[in-house]
Image: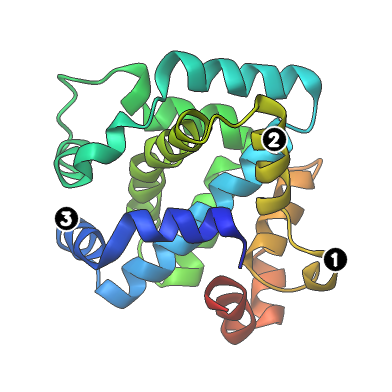
Amino acid sequence: MNDLMELLQSQMGGDLTQALSKQLNTEPEKTEVAVQSAFSAILSGLSKNVATEQGAQSFLGALDRDHDGSILNDLTGFLGGAIGGNSSNNTSMLNGAGILNHVLGSRQNNIIETIAKVAGIDSSKSGQLLVTLAPMVMGLLGKIKNTNSMSGGSLVDLISKSGQPQPEQKQSGILGVFSKMLDQDGDGNVMDDIAGMGMKSILGGLFK
C-alpha cells in the first residue's frame, strides 16, 4: 500500500471510524471499507486531474488558497458539522461537494454506487461519506506540502503514483476499478468488473 494512502488511514483512526459509523448509522466494518474505498476514489481522481500542467497548477493553487491542513486539527468537530449538515461555517476548505465535482466530474454518481456496492451500504451514505472525506484529503495534502516544504512538482508526482495501481495490480484492487472508471469515455459503470473480480480481490487491494 502506498505511503499517501497510509497517511490518510492514520489520520482517520478508530475513534473517527466509530464516529462516522454512528453518524451514518452503518456498521464499523462496513464504514472502514467505505472509507478506504472513498480515499482510493479521491486519490484516483486527483491523479487524473494533475496529469496535465494546467490541472496540476489548478490543484496546487487550490491547496495554497484553501487547504492548509488546519481541518485536521479537529476532525471530530468537523465530522459532526459536515455530516450533521451544519453549513454556517461552509468555506471553500470545507466544501466537499465542490471538491468532488472538480475531482470526479461526471463519474461521481458511478463512483458513489461502486463504493456502496463494495462496502455494502446505501448509496446515499457512500455519497455523504465522499463529501465528508474530500476536504480531509485536500487538508492532508496541503499539510504535507507545507510541513515538509515539499515542492509542488514533488507533491504532484506523489499523488500521481498514489492514485494509480502499480502495473502488476492493473487488473485487481479497488484502485484499478476507479482508474478504469475515470478513464472511460462514456457513462457506463464497472459493476460487472466488480462482480467478476470478487470481493476478496477488491478488499485485498485495500488492506494489503
Badge 2 density bin: few <14, some 14–19, many ≥20, Cα 10 Å: few
Q: Amino acid at mark 3?
A: Gln
Residue shown at 65% from the left, 26% from the top: 152
Left or right of residue 58: residue 114: left
Can you identify the residue that label 1 sits on?
167
Q: Nearer the viewer, residue 82 or 189?
A: 82
Q: Quadrant of residue 42?
A: top right
Of helix, strand and loop, which one carries label 1? Answer: helix
> Which mark is first along the chain, 3 or 2?
3
* Nearest the eye: 134 or 1: 1
Q: Earlier in the sequence, mark 1 or mark 2?
A: 2
Residue in the picture at 26% in, 73% down: 28
Task: Specify the label residue 154 is tagged with.
Answer: 2
Q: SS for tag 2?
A: helix
Amino acid type for the residue under numbered disc 1: Pro
Q: Nearer the viewer, residue 208 or 109?
A: 208
For marks 1 and 2, give the CA distance. 21 Å
Task: State left or right for residue 75 relative to residue 203.
Answer: left
Indicate the position of residue 98 as horizontal and vertical percent values.
45, 25
Circle nearer the viewer, 1 or 2: 2
Q: Identify the secondary structure beneath mark 3.
A: helix
Disc 2 from disc 3: Cα separation: 36 Å
Q: Amino acid at mark 2?
A: Ser
Q: Can residue 113 be seen from the camera position used here?
A: no
The reply, left or right, for residue 69 in relation to residue 170 is: left
Residue 82 occupies quadrant: top left
